[in-house]
Image (spheres, rainbow, N blue to C red):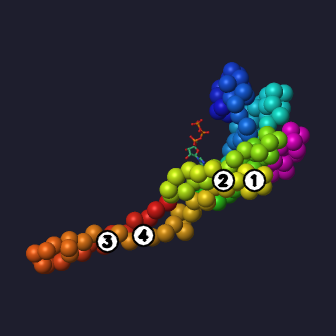
Amino acid sequence: MDTCDQEGPVNNERYLTWGSVFLVVYSIDSMESFKCCQLYLHMLSLHRKSPIILLGNKLDMDLYRQVSRSEAESVASCYGCVFFEVSACLDYLSVQHVFFEAIRRARKGRGYLVPAVCVSENRAAPLAPSYTTPCFKELPAPTTAKLVTVKTSRAQSKRRATTLTLLKGFKIF
Ligand SMILES: Nc1nc2c(ncn2[C@@H]2O[C@H](COP(=O)(O)OP(=O)(O)OP(=O)(O)O)[C@@H](O)[C@H]2O)c(=O)[nH]1
């Protein structure tokens, strides 16, 4: 569901029936978006017992902050949800942490074991169920991504032609 809906939280049944965890996101530089979030929090609290995460985005815009951390914390505690602030554009790891936390809470909230899915380069494979840590293979942050050197060579020519070796660097994210 989109907290930017002009009409607020309407016609959300389709989300409420299948959502296992809800991330309610506002911009810390927009009181309007925060107020709108509270409508969603209220609606979620009435309809579902699924975990809710209140998320203040655009932490990099702290200079233009309109929603204080303490105000958001107090709203979060009213609705019994966890609260984080992140910058989606500057801090990849904090966003990743929020998603991992969402998965952890969704899996705990179900009250029964859900097989974890391992995302790897090869293929998804079921793992032993675990309550605590989601078994997602963590993607490297762009800054720590491996630099893979791919060697393109025409050196195999049987004609013993002049060897041409091209070296290309690729960043794998
Ligand atoms: N400064 C800053 N800008 C951000 C950040 N995250 C998103 N934006 C910007 O905010 C604007 C809205 O981002 P969207 O991803 O479209 O957010 P949305 O909630 O889907 O917005 P709608 O499409 O209007 O529903 C874009 O211009 C983004 O570049 C952030 O962490 N910091």
Which amino acid, by three-letter code, is at mark 2?
Leu
| Marks 1 and 2 close (CB-CB < 8 Å) | yes
Q: Residue at x 71, y 23 (%)?
A: 13
In this rendering, position of residue 7 left or right of residue 108: left
In three-dimensional space, the C-alpha distance between marks 1 and 4, rounded to whole angstroms, equals 33 Å
Q: In the rendering, which numbered label is found on residue 148?
A: 4
In three-dimensional space, the C-alpha distance between marks 2 and 4, rounded to whole angstroms, equals 29 Å
Q: Ligand 1: does it lie within 8 Å of the C-beta at label 4?
A: no
In this rendering, position of residue 120 left or right of residue 26: left
Residue at mark 2: 127
In three-dimensional space, the C-alpha distance between marks 2 and 3, rounded to whole angstroms, equals 35 Å
Of the residues tagged 1 and 4, which is closer to the observer? Answer: 1
In three-dimensional space, the C-alpha distance between marks 3 and 1, rounded to whole angstroms, equals 41 Å
Main structural element of the magenta stretch: helix, strand or loop? helix
Q: Is residue 128 above or below residue 4?
A: below
Give percent across and percent down for residue 68: 80, 49
Q: Is residue 87 above or below residue 142?
A: above
Q: Tell me if mark 4 has few (under 14), some (14-19) or many (20+) residues whose alpha carbon lies within 10 angstroms of its own.
A: few
Q: Is residue 127 above or below residue 26?
A: below
Q: Tell me if mark 2 has few (under 14), some (14-19) or many (20+) residues whose alpha carbon lies within 10 angstroms of its own.
A: few
Name which of mark 2 and mark 3 comes first in the sequence.
2
What range is drawn magenta here? 69-84
Q: Residue at x 20, y 73 (%)?
A: 156
Image quadrant in which you'd find residue 170:
bottom left
Question: Considering the numbered disc 2 on the image, is that residue within a helix, a strand or a loop?
Answer: loop
In three-dimensional space, the C-alpha distance between marks 1 and 2, rounded to whole angstroms, equals 9 Å
In this rendering, position of residue 158 left or right of residue 99: left
Residue at mark 1: 130
Name which of mark 2 and mark 4 comes first in the sequence.
2
Residue at mark 3: 151
